[in-house]
Amino acid sequence: MNFKILKKSKISRARLGFLETDHGVVETPCLVPVATQAVVKTLDSKEVQETKSQILIANTFHLHLKPGEKIIDKAGKLQKFMNWKKPLMTDSGGYQVFSLGFGTDFGLGSKILKKEQERGEAIKENAQPQKIKINHDGVVFRSPINGDELFLGPKESIKIQEKLGADIIFAFDECTAPLADFSYVKKSLEKTHRWAKICLKAHSTGSGQAKKSKQALYGIVQGSRFKDLRLESSKFIGGLDFDGFGIGGEFGNDKKEMHKMVGWVVDELPEKKPRHLLGVGYLEDMELIIKSGVDTFDCTVPTHYARRGIAFTSEGKLNLKQTKFLKKREPLDKNCICNVCLNYKKDYICHLLKAGEITGMKLLTFHNLYYFNTFVEDIRTKIKKGEI
Ligand SMILES: [Zn+2]
């Protein structure tokens, strides 16, 4: 993989560049749509390409469980398996496996979590979640499919990701829950940092295949919302011989806080290597994320919201399940030139959603991805013109 910075903004940390992989070039900054099970739900690979998507991220944890990396390896790696000819990333599986732990115990992402935080309850040093066992080498957990006891650690994750064969893979880290206190996160960082070195070693010595195919490995910076720990992690991970860097974990409660926290990390990372923000990206956050100096970021928002009937448009978010849209004979967005907006109207999409027809979700997924990708394309133009 080759990363080149074409322009650096004079008014923010934003930068314009490109990532060159064996499967083509990605213009950055760039949104990375999520293809958890080796598919962007409801679309086929050709349709995804038509939404201006340049690169996808698939999920190591899910693909390891189903169908298993051996099947995918035999099919000629992930890109052949899913007929996606452009660049591809896989995550390490860390986020999913740790979500089975404290995430499940505390109802991660739910309102309960907020209450726990308000009550000052926290995950302290040496605490163990109920359903998984975190040890020195990785995580012991039960398969959500058949209850079998499984183990995932840095070596295992790299081995699986090499078999899956994406262009860019990630180191296995402990993704701490937002409730984790300073002492827990500090101890967790020691693990994440030790695992980062193991991942680098496993990837360079492994089968040898991976290096030959130029599969890039990104290290991941953690440290939650604590400045000291973020700086420590950025310096440590940034000092290792990774091809790029992921920024993971907790980023506070609002956009301003996120911008500040990402800034701490970015300032410590090597300038010339790409940075990927993991799992963040509401439409309203994108400009700020890019201004923080992030080159790529994955997010489920455009696809996840589409399946719930939500379209993103230049007039804001629309809930196409609302009956009023049955009377609107107009495109989702009159300024959008995607295949859906050129050929279908709100009344029909509303009808499909109300009738429970999957094509309704498909049309919204297509439009939302096109809309988000165009949004980021416009940001690239603004960087080029010196406006951002
Ligand atoms: Zn459209």
Image (spheres, grey):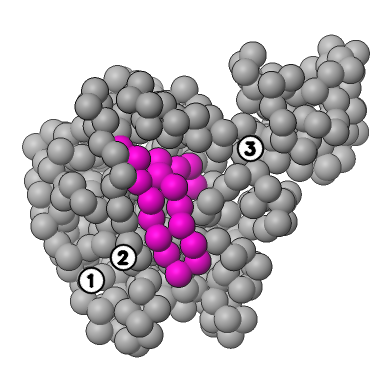
Is the residue at mark 3 in contact range of ligand 1, meaning its CB lies under 8 Å from it?
A: yes
| Above/below status of 377 relative to 221 | above
Q: Quadrant of residue 292?
A: top left
Q: Which mark is residue 200?
A: 1
Residue position marked by numbered label 3 in the rendering: 370
Residue kind at label 3, given as amino acid type? Tyr
Secondary structure found at label 1: helix
Distance from label 1 to label 2 (Cα)? 8 Å
Q: Relative to 174, is 208 above or below?
A: below
Range covered by the magenta-colored residues: 15-32
- First-in-chain label (1 vs 2): 1
Q: Is residue 338 above or below residue 158?
A: above
- In the image, taking residue 265 as reference, residue 32 lies left or right, namely right
- Point 19% across, 40% down: residue: 265
Q: Position of residue 193 (x, y in %)?
A: 16, 59
Q: Earlier in the sequence, mark 3 or mark 1?
A: 1
Q: Which badge, 2 or 3, comes first in the chain's sequence?
A: 2
How far apart are labels 3 and 1 at the CA level? 36 Å
Q: Nearer the viewer, mark 2 or mark 3?
A: 3
In the picture, residue 323 is in which quadrant? Answer: top right
- Given contact means CB atoms under 8 Å apart, are the residues at marks 1 and 2 in contact? yes
Give left or right: position of 150 versus 158. right
Residue at the image position 86 percent from the left and 15 percent from the top: 328
Say what secondary structure mark 3 lies in. helix
Residue identified by numbered label 2: 217
Label 2 – label 3 distance at C-alpha? 28 Å
- Crowding around mark 1 (Cα neighbors within 10 Å: few <14, some 14 to 19, many 20+) is many
Residue 218 appears at what percent x and percent y? 30, 60
Question: Tag 2: Cα neighbours inside 10 Å, few (<14), some, or many (≥20)?
Answer: many
Q: Is residue 43 left or right of residue 179?
A: right
Q: What's the magenta bit mostly, secondary-structure-wise?
A: strand
